[in-house]
Image (spheres, grey):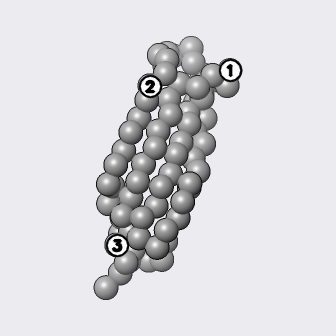
Amino acid sequence: MPAGTAMTSIDINVSYLRNILDTSGPLRGTGRVIKNGSRIVFAEAEIADKDGQLVATGTGTVLVIPPR
């Protein structure tokens, strides 16, 4: 985003799929923009443990507020 651009969340949804323990090891997050519109952006993310097992997923929608 260009400097001065702001964003505000419209919708956030997180699903926790399994416990995260001290033995889960380092967690790895992957995020993707699903649709990048001029004012609305849709994205999704996944978080996996050291064995590659999904521990959480999420989706979000944000409103882009251009600089004045």
In the rendered image of this protein, does residue 30 appear above or below residue 26? Answer: below
From the viewer's perspective, is 29 left or right of 52? left
Alpha-carbon span between mark 1 and mark 3:
39 Å
Amino acid carrying mark 2 in the image: Tyr
Q: Residue 32, image x and y in percent?
A: 58, 51
Residue that numbered label 1 is attached to: 51
Q: Secondary structure at mark 3?
A: strand
Disc nearest the viewer among 1 and 3: 3
Name the N-terminal-most of marks 3 and 2.
2
The circle on residue 65 is 3
Q: Quadrant of residue 7?
A: bottom left
Name the N-terminal-most of marks 1 and 3.
1
Amino acid carrying mark 1 in the image: Asp
The quarter of the picture where the C terminus appears is bottom left
Q: Secondary structure at mark 2?
A: strand
From the viewer's perspective, is 42 left or right of 5? right
Mark 2 Cα shell of 10 Å, populated few (<14), some (14-19), many (≥20): few
Q: Residue 16, image x and y in percent?
A: 44, 25
Alpha-carbon span between mark 1 and mark 2:
17 Å
Residue that numbered label 2 is attached to: 16
Residue at screen point 61% across, 35% down: 28
Residue at screen point 35% across, 81% down: 67
